[in-house]
Image (cartoon, rainbow, N blue to C red):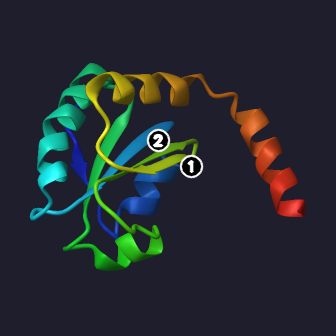
Amino acid sequence: MATQTLTTENFDEVVTSNNVVLVDFWAEWCGPCKSFAPTFEASSEKHPDVVFGKVDTEAQQGLAAAANIRSIPTIMAFREGVLVFAQPGALPPAALEDLVTQVEALDMDDVRKQLAEQQKG
């Protein structure tokens, strides 16, 4: 499955209506973003059950601000609508594959339990 463009209008729907979503926050002028794009695209072809989305931080400044993006590229991973990973910097192919595997293997009941405990505080 090819990557899809995420915007303010479709971001929440895509994240909440799919099991696993990886998001690449990028910009046209960003050299590391351009270098990472083929890696992200290749991974999307290997994992048709995972949604790979891209957010152009120039075109979607409000979305980038809401996501607290400070540097690009930034990769975020969502599982069942829950943010489970966020890290600035381009990942090498093996690390991106490892991330997909780890996100798919998460015990979401345990993740939700941990989040609930953190919110209690």
Please give the residue where the numbered disc 2 appears in the rendered image: 18
Residue occupying image coordinates x 47% and y 37%:
20
Give the image quarter of residue 49.
top left
88 lies above or below 113: below
From the viewer's perspective, tell me whether residue 109 is left or right of residue 68.
right
From the viewer's perspective, tell me whether residue 22 is left or right of residue 42.
right
Residue 75 position, x and y percent, is 38, 48
Q: Quadrant of the C terminus?
A: bottom right
Residue 55 position, x and y percent, is 27, 60
Residue occupying image coordinates x 29% and y 66%:
7
SS at mark 1 in the image: loop
73 lies above or below 42: below
Check disc 1: other Cα within 10 Å, few if <14, some if 14-19, many if 20+. some
Residue situated in front as seen by the camera: 92 or 56: 92
Please give the residue where the numbered disc 1 appears in the rendered image: 81
Give the Cα separation between the discs numbered 1 and 2. 8 Å
Query: Closer to the N terminus: mark 1 or mark 2?
Result: 2
Residue situated in front as seen by the camera: 91 or 21: 91
3 lies above or below 11: above
Q: What residue type is labelled 1?
A: Gly
Residue 18 position, x and y percent, is 47, 41
Q: Which amino acid does label 2 sit on?
A: Asn
Residue 3 position, x and y percent, is 22, 42
Residue occupying image coordinates x 63% and y 28%:
106
Give the image quarter of residue 109.
top right
Residue occupying image coordinates x 46% and y 67%:
67
SS at mark 2 in the image: loop
From the viewer's perspective, tell me whether residue 92 is left or right of residue 64.
left
- Which label belongs to residue 92? none
Residue situated in front as seen by the camera: 13 or 69: 69
